[in-house]
Image (spheres, coloured by chain):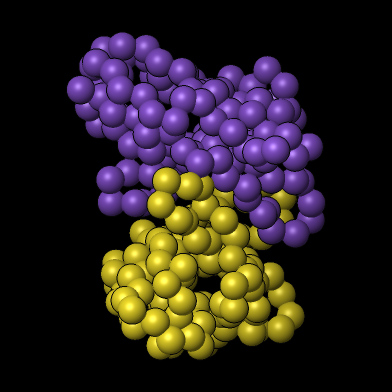
Amino acid sequence: DTAVSQTPKYLVTQMGNDKSIKCEQNLGHDTMYWYKQDSKKFLKIMFSYNNKELIINETVPNRFSPKSPDKAHLNLHINSLELGDSAVYFCASSARDLGPPKLFFGSGTQLSVL
Amino acid sequence: AQSVTQLGSHVSVSEGALVLLRCNYSSSVPPYLFWYVQYPNQGLQLLLKYTTGATLVKGINGFEAEFKKSETSFHLTKPSAHMSDAAEYFCAVSGGGGFQKLVFGTGTRLLVSP
């Protein structure tokens, strides 16, 4: 019954590799996000999709490519991993309405690049 | 543009004591303000939010926050801390309406001692 689920929970990999993180939500939301949380716990938005369309794209290296096959899924693919990519990546979703977005977060994917 | 400053990366209280976590914001438009809580190895959960209207907002688990426009503050309080309140707390701001991204503060870790 997990609302927003991410896989894998932990990802340990070597520099230069390519990896993907998957995210799925069963809340019927039409907007999904990727956030990056660094070692100092600072959370910064990376991307947001609404109905499979990219609506927010922060200054993120183009090695990061989000893919939304449908509005319930938003995957994150990372090419040529670097040490600085080590962080916790959170997927989130929200419903589109006139008020402020209430985000529902997944439990995070801890990425360690060696 | 919006930004959030959380004063104090760590706050320690005794069980039963008052909890006060400070948040100041900057926004060029009327802000929406949020407090999220993150328990270890979990995603963020919404505690409470301010949109418009009543400036004292009540949230879950006995927490409340007061929007003070003159002070650009949105401090989080709880009259009596429980051990289960130990977590990381994030203040966030958005500009309101549409596809607005949340801008998070750097978080405050609340430590509760017996």
Measured as percent of width and height from the top left, residue A24 is found at: 64, 29
Count of residue discs: 0
Res B83 quadrant in image: bottom left
- Which residue corresponds to the image point at 45% horizontal and 56% vertical from the top-left? B39
Q: Which of A44 and B18 is in front in this view?
A: B18
Measured as percent of width and height from the top left, residue A98 is found at: 79, 56
Measured as percent of width and height from the top left, residue B110 is found at: 36, 70
- Which residue corresponds to the image point at 56% horizontal and 77% vertical from the top-left? B63
Q: Which of B30 and B49 is in front in this view?
A: B49
Q: Which of A53 and B16 is in front in this view?
A: B16
For the C terminus of chain B, give its image quadrant.
Answer: bottom left
Q: In this view, does B109 lie above or below B114?
A: above
Q: Is residue A73 above or below residue B67?
A: above
Using the rendered image of the protein, determine whether residue A109 is visible from the camera's viewpoint: yes
Q: Nearer the viewer, residue A39 or B100?
A: A39
Res A92 quadrant in image: top right
> The chain shown in yellow is which?
B
Measured as percent of width and height from the top left, residue B49 is found at: 63, 68
Q: In this view, does A108 lie to the left or right of A37?
A: right
Pick out the residue farthest to the top: A17
- Which residue corresponds to the image point at 58% horizontal and 20% vertical from the top-left? A67
- Which residue corresponds to the image point at 23% horizontal and 16% vertical from the top-left? A15
User: Chain A is which colour?
Assistant: purple
Using the rendered image of the protein, determine whether residue A59 is visible from the camera's viewpoint: no
